[in-house]
Image (tube, helix red, strand yellow):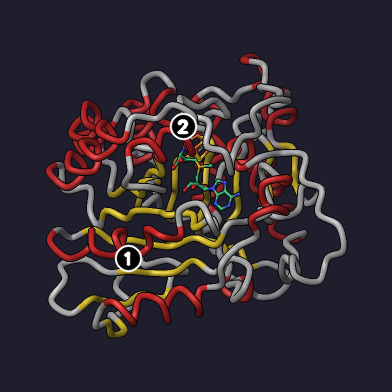
Amino acid sequence: MAITDSYNRKIDYLRISVTDRCNMRCAYCMPLEGIKLIPHHEVLHYGEIREIVKAGALLGIKSIRLTGGEPTIRRDLSRFISMLKEVEGIEEVTLTTNALLLSKLAQEFKDAGLDRVNISLDSLKPERFSEITRGGDLKAVLEGIQAALDADLSPVKLNVVVIPGFNDDEIEDMAALSIERPLHVRYIEFMPIGDQRLHKEKKYIKTAELVERLKKKFEISVANKGAGMGPASSYRIKGAKGTIGFISSISEHFCSTCNRLRLSSDGWLRSCLFNENLAVDMKTPLRNGASLDDLKELFMKAAGIKPVGHELDTRGSLDFKRTMSQIGG
Ligand code: SAM
Ligand code: SF4
């Protein structure tokens, strides 16, 4: 059985935010003030999330990505990874992390069954990195990246949010990371979620412009669209072990092939990253004794309200109340 939405898109991918808390505070993701944390009693337990995943798997969900907030700060994440890997129908469990704690955890995650990781990295300059993440330690993150390679959590992808006038002077240095090691660098367009003020001030750089700039420095060609490359179009610098890719969420959005739903840590099943209202409450029914069949119904409901596209470029006002750390980016 497979869920298809009203526009005939097959839904087989679920992103799960296991916490809205974080051990960094990236400027583009969490504003300095005004973030209201979800009270602990409202956060789904691992057992509750597994019930939701079981229902999803019965409907064709095959791939799970754990995210947050910072997923690695939630206690016993390895145990949860193995719980998910045991759910029939789940073929892949992956993780998006800031890698601050990864050097110690990578092998444990691998042993628990984690398939691969995406790591956020927005600067290679220690001071700038600390500024953008408000205190993050670049050295620890670089060690985390190496640990992910050593533990074979591959392909290891590096997510770079490009912010004009802030880190766009580093796009070439970031691309060079893909040459010696099998690292897959992906540039993400800065989206108007999180710090709206910063986004209004800085805007974003379109993928086409980034590609032109990189072509001036490197000989690049289109890489094969390997398994698990996701919505990023990918290129390879001549002779490089890894690739470079672009997630053009705004300028060339991939809504027409969107295959995902998102579960927030407080149990809202969201049909679109960009629309807060198109979500279904899973927690209340679950805590009132919902059966697997009931949860399946709720999955179908979430798929049924999935919009055709985010229409960010045409929507007049954007007023997101939740940040990426709260939704689960
Ligand atoms: N803490 C983990 C991390 O940083 O990788 C996982 C959660 S974080 C919310 C997931 C991804 O969302 C990160 O790659 C981050 O760079 C991205 N992100 C957060 N806010 C964003 C924004 N306004 N525009 C584009 N990407 C954003
Ligand atoms: Fe934390 Fe990730 Fe958001 Fe940075 S992007 S503040 S690491 S959740």
Q: Does the residue labelled 1 lie within 8 Å of ligand 1?
A: no
Q: Residues within 10 Å of mark 1 (few under 14, many from 20)?
A: some
At horizontal 60% and vertical 31% (from top left) the residue drawn is 265
Three-letter residue code for mark 2: Glu
Q: How crowded is mark 2: few (under 14 residues within 10 Å), some or many (20 or more)?
A: many
Q: Distance between the residues labelled 2 and 1?
A: 27 Å
The answer to whether any part of residue 271 appears in the image is: no
At horizontal 44% and vertical 26% (from top left) the residue drawn is 135
Q: Report the front residue among 118 and 120.
A: 120
Q: Is residue 180 above or below residue 57?
A: below
Q: Number of labelled discs? A: 2
214 left or right of 188 in image: left
Report x, y in % for residue 60. Answer: 51, 58
At horizontal 74% and vertical 28% (from top left) the residue drawn is 284
At horizontal 18% and vertical 38% (from top left) the residue drawn is 147
Report x, y in % for residue 260. Answer: 57, 58
145 left or right of 234 in image: left
- The residue that mark 2 highlights is 70
Name the element at disc 2.
loop
Three-letter residue code for mark 1: Glu
21 left or right of 326 in image: left
Report x, y in % for residue 307. Answer: 75, 65
Q: Give the mark nearer the N terminus: 2 vs 1.
A: 2
- The residue that mark 1 highlights is 172
Report x, y in % for residue 294. Answer: 69, 41
Q: Report the front residue among 133 and 289.
A: 133
Q: Is residue 193 above or below residue 79?
A: below
Of tags 2 and 1, which is closer to the observer? 1
Instruction: Verify CB contact (< 8 Å) between mark 2 and mark 1.
Output: no
Q: Is mark 2 within 8 Å of ligand 1?
A: yes
Name the element at disc 1.
helix
Q: Is residue 27 above or below residue 57?
A: above
